[in-house]
Amino acid sequence: MFKKQMRLFALLFFGVITILRAQEYSKQEGLWNAVFFDLPLTDQLTLRSEIHLRTTDYFNIWDQHILRPQLTYTTAKNIKWTAGYSFLRNFNTDVNADPRIRNEHNLWEQLLYTVPLKKGALSTWLRLEHRFQENLPLQQDSSLRSFGFSSRIRVRVTYLKPLTTEAAKTPVNFVFYDEIFTLMNPSGIPYKFNQNWTFFGFRIKLNEKMTLNTGFQKNTIFKSSEQYLTKRLWNTILFYKL
């Protein structure tokens, strides 16, 4: 099953790369900082809360705020099942826009499968999102605002490779992942490319409670039939076990 998933992801990835080469791009640079709080409830259940703060033009312009609580069930066969909720505040890049913030409520389910390797690990996740986004154009009177519904699928493959020995006081790993977002039609069938994320960086275990993930991320986002937005971000996440 895993090999079939990997072949499918490879076909999707190379197909997306071929399509994107022929398009025109606008570009943004920024920072993505986040904190993940993990609270183990039992040996198999973990409650996580994520807080994300993303900017464009580095520290100058807000791009997105995310609050994402979730519950994960871990099985004995390297499989994790997760369900969660996301509240997103999406900012218009024009700081003079009024109104500037578009809200989104997002319910999602995720399946994560990990394959241990001799040195490192390879994992893939499949996430299904149910999105309630404020309809455009935004209304200044909040009572006049309405929400539209849509769904999308996200598929991510992650590779983790140790760069230090097991006995190292501060273990460091190299991390790479690529993730493809695909929109779904009302019948639940994937039909349109939405985004592609590519990340490479480092995972550093600071102590038994804190792990730092930091590196470069490139997001390519579909805007129209011939226009794409490229976001180059320095992404830093602090994982904290309560």
Image: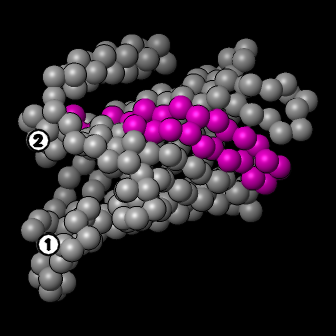
Q: List x then y, in percent, for residue 214.
A: 60, 43
Residue at 60 percent of width and 31 percent of height: 175
**Number of other residues with Cα within 10 Å of mark 1, as a class: few under 14, some 14 to 19, many 20 or more:** some
The amino acid beneath tag 1 is: Leu
- Residue 24 sits in quarter: top left
Secondary structure at numbered mark 2: loop
Q: Which residues are magenta?
A: 190-218
The residue lying toward the viewer, choosing from 209 and 74, is 209
Quick check: can you spot residue 146? no
> In this view of the protein, which residue sits in the foreground, 47 or 219?
219
| The magenta stretch spans residue 192 | yes
Coloring applied to the structure: one colour
User: Which residue is painted at 8% across and 36% down in the image?
Assistant: 225
The kind of secondary structure element at disc 1 is: loop
Q: Nearer the viewer, residue 22 or 49?
A: 22
- Categorize mark 2 by other alpha carbons within 10 Å: few (<14), some (14-19), many (20+): few
* Badge 1 or badge 2: first in the primary sequence: 1
The kind of residue on which mark 2 rests is Ser
Residue 115 falls left or right of residue 130 = right
Q: Is residue 103 above or below residue 3?
A: below
Please identify the quarter of the rendering in which residue 218 is found: top left
Q: Which mark is residue 138?
A: 1
State the residue position of label 2: 224
Q: Residue at left 57%, top 62%?
A: 49
Q: Main secondary structure of the magenta part?
A: strand
x then y, percent, for residue 23: 16, 29
Q: Quadrant of the C terminus?
A: bottom right
Q: Residue at x 57, y 49 (%)?
A: 236
- Whether 7 is drawn above or below 165: the answer is above
Residue 169 at x, y = what percent?
89, 38
